[in-house]
Amino acid sequence: MSEIVVSGIRSTGNLHLGNYFGAIRNFLKLQEQHQCYFFIADFHSLTTHPTPSDLLGNTRQVLIEYLACGLDPEKCVLYRQSDVHEIPELYLLLNMNAYLGELERCTTFKEKARKQPNNINAGLLTYPVLMAADILIHKASKVPVGKDQEQHLEMTRNFAARFNRMYGVDYFPEPVAYNFGKELIKIPGLDGSGKMGKSEGNAIHLSDPPEVIRKKVMRAVTDSGPTQANQPMSEPVANLFMLMKIISSTDTYQYFLDSYNQCTIRYGDMKKQLAEDIIAFIKPIYDRIIELNNRPDYLKQVIELGADKARQSASKTLKEVREIIGFKAF
Ligand code: TYM
């Protein structure tokens, strides 16, 4: 049965392997058989970057990278959040049913508030409400995202259920975070702990040239090596193995795992191999990024078509929501 799928990525920098494996890879499969919407979250980008020097350029870059990954504008709707005015209106309406306590308890809010103490703006606080509006505006049931978005999805379900309860309707579905491998994933960064992220400086970008990838991987944090057979791995080493498991062949992964367990591993060799495998994985995407950079007319066509299609779906939902709440014509 065809389902409605929505996902998006903030336009605050070039896409990295975490974005690819957390969100895009799942979407590539889903676009083949479901009704899929994938957007560039440019409103959301203002919560952390309120005065971007090149908002349009950032959006354009993300669009190029979506297309280079294989998102197909013939199969799914690719659009920019700020082109769909119905989203901020639904955001406003949902804000009336979102409570300070639950917004303040949100982990990402607490994290961001710690990171940018001089800019704890209301947009940051209500970030999950805007995200719920993104999802509910198309009445989506599946949302392909990485593990870090799990709590936001739980909040979206709460807002949807609360709306239904408050207005006595069975209107919004309760969407779930989706990964085809069942478990949501977290791609680690190269700095030994935590996740790969845009602002952490620990990411491999899909637009990184081979020499940059080699440098980044060779600099990745490890430890002084195992001293006894089958020794549990330290976090930085476990992270490198996780990347290798996702990117490299099973044989390569097994070879280095065995050599770790037998204490014969040389991290330098492992990193060299991992770097080459990442380069090979990224190469077709990297080449298409360069090619798409030279096709401004095509990009314009894609974004305009996406805006039209997204607004068709969004305006239908918003019209119904307005009626449910009681905003009716005179
Ligand atoms: P953003 O821009 O931080 O990340 C975009 C997507 O990439 C995933 N991701 C990761 N997955 C695994 N490992 C990682 N290291 C990693 N880093 C990032 C994220 O989980 C996400 O799926 N709030 C969203 C953007 C958004 C959205 C939405 C998503 C706005 N509205 C509606 C889905 C539906 C965000 O900040 O993503």
Image (tube, rainbow, N blue to C red):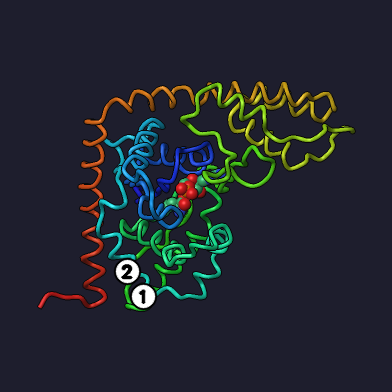
- Residue name at image x 33 percent, y 58 percent: 139
- Residue name at image x 55 percent, y 47 percent: 182
Q: Position of residue 244 (x, y in %)?
A: 64, 30
Q: Is residue 137 above or below residue 273?
A: below
Q: Position of residue 118 (x, y in %)?
A: 51, 63
How dense is the environment of label 1, judged by Cα within 10 Å: few (below 14), some, or many (20 and up)? Answer: few
How dense is the environment of label 2, judged by Cα within 10 Å: few (below 14), some, or many (20 and up)? Answer: some
Question: In this view of the protein, can residue 179 be seen by the observer?
Answer: no
The C terminus appears in which quarter of the rendering?
bottom left
Q: Is mark 1 within 8 Å of ligand 1?
A: no
Q: Secondary structure at mark 1?
A: loop
Q: Are marks 1 and 2 in contact (CB under 8 Å)?
A: yes
Q: Which mark is residue 92?
A: 2
Which residue, as the protein is rendered here, is positioned at the far left? 330
Residue 90 position by quadrant: bottom left
Q: Position of residue 308 (x, y in %)?
A: 20, 47
Residue 125 versus residue 28: which sits nearer the camera?
125
Q: Is residue 218 above or below residue 109?
A: above
Which residue, as the protein is rendered here, is positioned at the far right? 228
Q: Is residue 71 above or below residue 51?
A: above
For badge 1, the amino acid type reads Met
- Residue name at image x 26 percent, y 54 percent: 84
- Residue name at image x 49 percent, y 65 percent: 120
Residue 163 position by quadrant: bottom left
Q: Disc 1 versus disc 2: distance between alpha carbons?
A: 7 Å
Residue 257 versus residue 62: which sits nearer the camera?
62
For badge 2, the amino acid type reads Leu
Q: Which mark is residue 96?
A: 1
Give the left or right position of residue 310, taking residue 218 as reference. Answer: left
Residue 32 versus residue 192: which sits nearer the camera?
192
Q: Is mark 2 within 8 Å of ligand 1?
A: no
Count every numbered label the image shows and give the total: 2
